[in-house]
Image (cartoon, coloured by chain):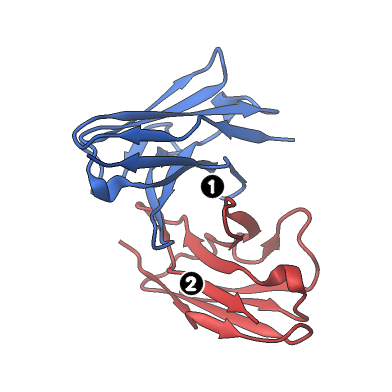
């Protein structure tokens, strides 16, 4: 199965700062990768799919890029509501797999 | 607006089965590829099974293939996931999702003697 490795595991940043999250795949997933944001007690919310297509309602401060095995999620100016856990997921091959998550904290 | 509404929390004993429902509104279930994901106490997301959009067949993780079944009731636009032979490690929140877009709110399944 394809292993997704996210880094860092925890990212401590301040409001207004820039955050860059990484997701690396053990083999190519082309651009069949999604990014999710999850807050406590809530379901994951899709931010990007197709590696870089922003989902409806996602703030323009979020951007995503990458293909094959290297992917990046960037938040250009952190707001208080952005502090959450972020997951990447590949849907190129069975079984679908998730990264272990990056926790964004103050 | 597509919404997925899941059934309520369940408490089960080891060896029992659980069936979680996921009612779709705002779209026809027949046009969706439904998947099931769980999240254990440690927070890790784990894909269990889903429908292959190519042929509609059910694909499951090898870890669950002997214990999981997915069914649909097109008349009520509801998808179901049944997991059998439950053990304590199956305690988790179970989500239905049309990966990657729409997710249910989650159903807590607790397995304890």
Chain drawn in red: A
Rendering quarter of residue B20: top left
Label 2 marks which chain's residue? A
The residues bearing labels 2 and 1 have C-alpha atoms spaced at a distance of: 19 Å
| Residue A74 visible to an observer of this rendering | yes
Front position in the image: A45 or A29:
A45
Residue sticking out furthest to the top? B75
Residue that mark 2 sits on: A68
Q: Residue B39 location in percent, x, y?
A: 42, 53
- Give the quadrant of the N terminus of chain B: top right
Chain drawn in blue: B
Label 1 marks which chain's residue? B
Front position in the image: B64 or B83:
B83
Q: Residue B52 location in percent, x, y?
A: 42, 39
Residue sticking out furthest to the front? B113
SS assignment at label 2: loop
| Residue B61 visible to an observer of this rendering | no
Q: Residue B44 location in percent, x, y?
A: 41, 61
Observer-side mark, 2 or 1, equals 1
From the viewer's perspective, is B90 left or right of B66? right
């Amino acid at each position: 199965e394809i292993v997704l490795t996210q880094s860092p595991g925890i990212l401590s940043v301040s409001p207004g700062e820039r955050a860059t999250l990484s997701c690396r795949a053990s083999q190519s997933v082309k651009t069949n990768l999604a990014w999710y944001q999850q807050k406590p007690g809530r379901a994951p919310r899709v931010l990007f799919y197709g590696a870089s297509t922003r989902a409806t309602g996602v703030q323009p401060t979020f951007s995503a890029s990458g293909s094959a095995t290297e992917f990046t999620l960037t938040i250009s100016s952190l707001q208080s509501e952005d502090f959450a856990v972020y997951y990447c997921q590949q849907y190129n091959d069975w079984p679908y797999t998730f990264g272990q998550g990056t926790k964004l904290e103050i | 607006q597509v919404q997925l509404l899941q059934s309520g929390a369940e408490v089960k004993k080891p060896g029992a089965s659980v069936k979680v429902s996921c009612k779709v509104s705002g779209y026809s279930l027949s046009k969706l590829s439904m998947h099931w994901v769980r999240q254990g106490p440690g927070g890790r997301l784990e894909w269990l099974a889903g429908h292959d959009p190519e042929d509609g067949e059910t694909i499951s993780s090898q870890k669950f293939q002997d214990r999981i079944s997915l069914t649909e009731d097109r008349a009520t636009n509801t998808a179901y996931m049944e997991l059998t032979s439950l053990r304590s490690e199956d305690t988790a929140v179970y989500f239905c999702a049309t990966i990657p877009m729409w997710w249910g709110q989650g159903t807590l399944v607790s397995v304890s003697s």
